[in-house]
Image: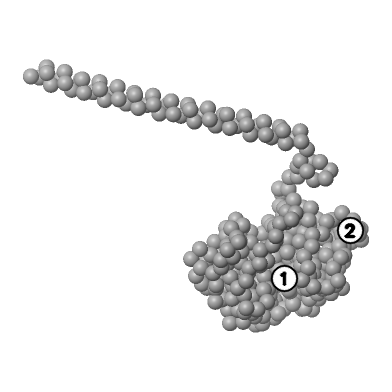
Amino acid sequence: MIWNMKPQMRAYRFDGHKEAVTSVQFSPSGHLVASSSRDKTVRLWVPNMKAESTVFRAHTATVRCVNFSADGQTLVTASDDKTIKLWTVHRQKFLFSLSQHMNWVRCAKFSPDDRLIVSSSDDKSIKLWDKNSRECIHSFSEHAGYANYVDFHPSGTCIAAASTDHSVKVWDIRSHKMLQHYPVHSGAVNSLSFHPAGNFLITASSDSTLKILDLLEGKLLYTLHGHQTSERVEQLNRQDSQTTTFTHDFNSSCCHSRGAHYYTHRVGSPSTQQTRSVQPPTQKDKVVSGASDGRIPSSLTNTLEHIVGQLDVLTQTVSILEQRLTLTEDKLKECLENQMEIGLHLQNRDEA
């Protein structure tokens, strides 16, 4: 189902899959929705009232995960048939398979620049793939459990893995070393999501909690309670104020950071020699402050409307000037052609 978050707006139900849906993602443009299912298929939906979809006969077993590339041109799918497959979005054709995992593949994600793919499997490995060469360039080992979920840091230099051993690990994909280890949950960690700036990481666990980790300080910041069953976090929004979670009791909710319990103790790491802080991107999210209730102040609204009006006037003025310039060019061209004709006429008369 697709929900409109505005008040008193209905949800749209999309029917098509024959069994449980395992993963859903919007394309970067927001014009398409991809879904994967236990029915071994992937569907590409147009998110409107018609609910039209195209079916990919994707795998020979349950499809656990589907994700778009950053440019929205490619899909990657992960399946219980131990393979990862890539597909074109617009032509809706199969490209190639990646098949070195020895057990179910839980998750597969593109890097921010679309050059790499990271995957996690029940074979207790996390593999890093080169999309162009189609080769596995490194395999990270999970000894105590397997990774349910894996994703790239927004900078593309690190990956984070949500593990069944109740912990979250952050790895450097260049040195292939573990940077940080967060044994903060009391149950399997089901999923995670980086803040767009890369400074924070939110995790969701079968212990019915969400936890927000400060990657710069290497410590746990908040624990969010509310659900009674295991949780899965989908994504931190770009405004940094909310995160959407889904639970196995089929409820969805938006959790605010306000009112959450605050922790100041540091999280233990595997070794001081091996672990260091994650380097975030240099750019930071810019937040425009408004009214205390989240609305834009009326004075700012009036100012913006005035600026927009002035821009409209300027646009119209430039358009009129362009039209006049075009007319002037046409008249000048006509005068030059007339002068050339007169000159040729006089030249012919003199020769005669």
Residue 166 spot, x, y in % from top left: 82, 73
Residue 81 spot, x, y in % from top left: 61, 81
The numbered disc on residue 149 is 1
Q: Is residue 309 above or below residue 238?
A: above
Residue picked out by circle 2? 260
Q: Cα distance, mark 1 to mark 2?
A: 24 Å
Q: Nearer the viewer, residue 348 or 248?
A: 248
Residue 253, image quadrant: bottom right
Residue 303 spot, x, y in % from top left: 71, 32
Residue in the image at 29% along x and 23% along y: 336
Residue 300 spot, x, y in % from top left: 74, 35
Q: Is residue 198 visible?
A: no
Per the image, label 1 sits on a secondary structure element best described as strand
Instruction: Give amino acid for label 1.
Output: Tyr
* Viewer-side label of 1, 2: 2
Residue in the image at 71% along x and 57% along y: 9
Residue 220, image quadrant: bottom right
Residue in the image at 61% along x and 64% along y: 33
Left/right of residue 4 with respect to residue 168 in the rendered view: left
Instruction: Give amino acid for label 2.
Output: Ala
Q: Is residue 184 visible?
A: yes
Q: Badge 2, how many Cα within 10 Å: few under 14, some, many 20+?
A: some
* Quadrant of the frame with the C terminus: top left
